Image (cartoon, coloured by chain):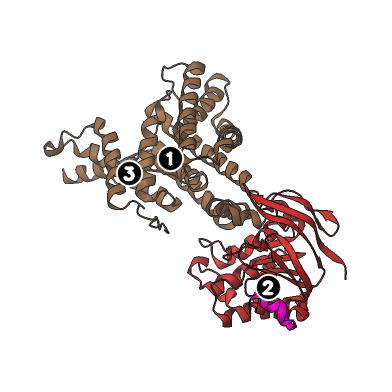
Chain colours: A brown, B red
Amino acid sequence: MVLAAFSDFMQQIVSGLASGGIYALLALALVIIHRSTGVINFAQGEMATLSTYIAWTLIAQHGWRYAPAFVATLVISFVGGFAIHRVVIRPVERGSVLRIVIVTIGLLVAINGFVIWKWGGEPQQLQSPFGTDTFTIGGVVIAAHDIGTIAVALGIVLLLWVLFRFTKVGLALRAAAVNPDEARLVGVRVSWMLALGWGLAALLGAVAGMLTAPTVGLDPNMMAAVLIYSFAAAVLGGIDSPIGAVVGGLIVGVLLNLLGYLSQYDAVSWFTEELRLPAALLIILVVLLVRPQGIFGKPEVKRV
Amino acid sequence: MRTLLELDAVAARYGPVQALHDVSLVVREGEIVAVLGANGAGKTTTLRAISGVVSRTGSIELEGKPLKGGPEAAARAGIAHVPEGRGTFVDLTVTENLRLGAYTRRDRSVKADVKRVAEYFPWMLERGGQRAGTLSGGEQQMLALGRALMSRPRLMLLDEPSLGLAPLIVREFFRIVRKLNEDEGLTVLVVEQDARIALNASTRAYVLEVGRVALTGPSQELRDDESIRRSYLGY
């Protein structure tokens, strides 16, 4: 009995980590754009949904195999994110933060409308690249998709870390984000770097979307809730901290999953699935009140 | 000596404020040229006009070729601009700052150059992993100089390097600049509020007054002329 409860618990941890990996990817996308453009990209979720529909079209309608469709989707998303910055964001970038925010909300609505117009509202099925198998390790049943999701998320995070830490373009991306004026003086083409950041964010969203669709089903509003969870993750970790986004994503994923799991006990049986979104918003609220800079963020110092 | 940089009737403005009216100056290869003047005379704007941070009219030529476009283009043309307030990337490490200095270079000898630069600033090797924001003001100014060197510039622009630094550190800074000038033939255009130290370090100087060149001459002559010192340089 106790053992069964424990393996159940472990199972929830693993699937929480899988969801958390997805939140981490999308939170990373939010962080990259927030660091460079200074706003939360509200369209991040819809961009991911659009990417996922592109993957679905290639696989389900054009008969592509998963791997090439995955790669093609990443490339298309990267180019798309890059283009969104050049065409839509750059013209308003020198304006107030509010203007950029409103443009990203406009993007959200526009992309959502486009997806419904193009593919209709009814849910579609996107296969998992990892199949539907389950393993049993020490009595813990683990879905291959969960393990694959965790592995992909960690792999992407690692690649991104190498890019930012060790490559010349990564260094330029960081310099352009934190100190654009000085970056220009050393020859960095800052506006291209910002577009590159949007491309990377779109690519991260595409991965998050393709990993989300197999479990929740592909529909035009698939990423709406995921974006809120990712936002909670980014705020918890620190909105300007890439490490924070990853740690925050995993924490939010596990936490929300465990809360749902606890509802089997009478004392907290009222905590059902529907309360997950409010719980995420509660996390955002508490963090903003108690520690606005998040776990890994630096407190903002305003000089007067 | 060959002419490296030539400004002819350069003007620049910030919105409605005309900061430069008519500045013409020449920097020859291997020189250290100082630009002096009171607050608001247009010293910083002159440097910003050269590196394209502000838009300007008139002609600016580097080795006979017109300098066009923004600071990215100026950096590629071989200008290393160390802005006022040091311009180090405080969130990045010492080594990362140096690597960024070499951003416009395509060759592979960047690592060797970090060593070359560190000969002038030995502490940078030992503290390569330290965040630039945690350095002292003097160290940050040295790092800004080291980063500028990493681009192997044709011309280095230094904006008020003495600002906020102790006199001893300012002297050390200018000692290194002179050594670079002698050892490597580095050409420097330096803007300074502290006329005394700038005149000691430079070969020639220009004095700006409200956006115009008021007078120019060899630094030694300006230094020795008491009436000039009194009326323009305030010491």
Where disc 1 sits, the SS reads helix
- Spatial CA distance of label 2 from label 3 is 65 Å
**Residue B111 percent coordinates (x, y):** 67, 67
| Discs 3, 1 touching: Cβ within 8 Å | no
Q: Which residue is mark 1?
A: A149
Identified at 55% across, 57% down, the residue is A165
Q: Is residue A187 above or below residue A233?
A: below
Q: Amino acid at mark 2?
A: Tyr
Residue range in magenta is B223-235
Q: Which residue is mark 3?
A: A252
Which residue is at the far right?
A: B1
Q: Which residue is mark 2?
A: B232
In the rendered view, does A185 fall on the left or right side of B136? Answer: right
Residue B228 in the magenta stretch? The answer is: yes
Q: Image quarter for residue B26?
A: bottom right
Would you call the spot at circle 2 few (<14 residues within 10 Å), some (14-19), or many (20 or more)?
Answer: some
